[in-house]
Amino acid sequence: MVANPQSAYNGEGMKENKVKIIFTVEEQVKANFKIQLQYDSLTQAKFFRAIMDGYVSNDPELAQFLNKFKKKNSIQNNVQRKKVITNIKKAEEVKNKFALGDEEVENIFDILEKEYPEL
């Protein structure tokens, strides 16, 4: 699954209460981060929303990066990491098999709503 640019994490149209996520980093890491954000024309909020969106939607490229990170930092064993990657691939295959992207699912709901307005 590729991250949906219209997700709830982009800060637009959110009707739920918002919460702050706070963590600490070394000053030099923050300085380098701010410089890189400026270079990429991103705000901190946009960056973290994009990462969160990619993470919860199982973006395969982000999953691959996280798998390398987990291996490097001894998070999960090889079997667990392979199982996560396999499950993400299987989910993508099912999605492709049935051609059910976000737009198609939305169209199905629109058709059902027209056919059965009482639902």
Image: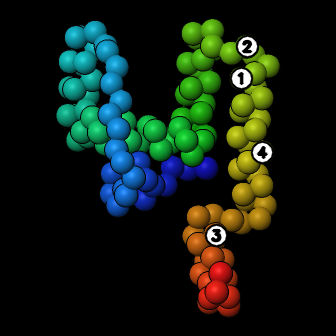
Mark 3: amino acid: Val
Is 32 on the left or on the right of 59, as rendered? left
Task: Give the mark, 3 or 4, whose residue is nearer the N terminus.
Answer: 4
Q: Where in the figure is residue 93, as x and y percent of width and height?
A: 76, 52
Looking at the picture, does residue 97 appear above or below residue 85?
Answer: below
Dots 1, 2 in contact, CB < 8 A:
yes
Mark 2: amino acid: Asn
The residue wearing badge 4 is 90
Q: Residues within 10 Å of mark 2 (few under 14, many from 20)?
A: few
**Residue 105, labelled with which disc?**
3
The residue wearing badge 2 is 77
Please name the residue shown 78% across and 61% down the image: 97
Please name the residue shown 20% across and 34% down the image: 38
The residue wearing badge 1 is 81
Give the CA separation, mark 3 to mark 1.
Answer: 30 Å
Please name the residue shown 32% across and 15% down the image: 24
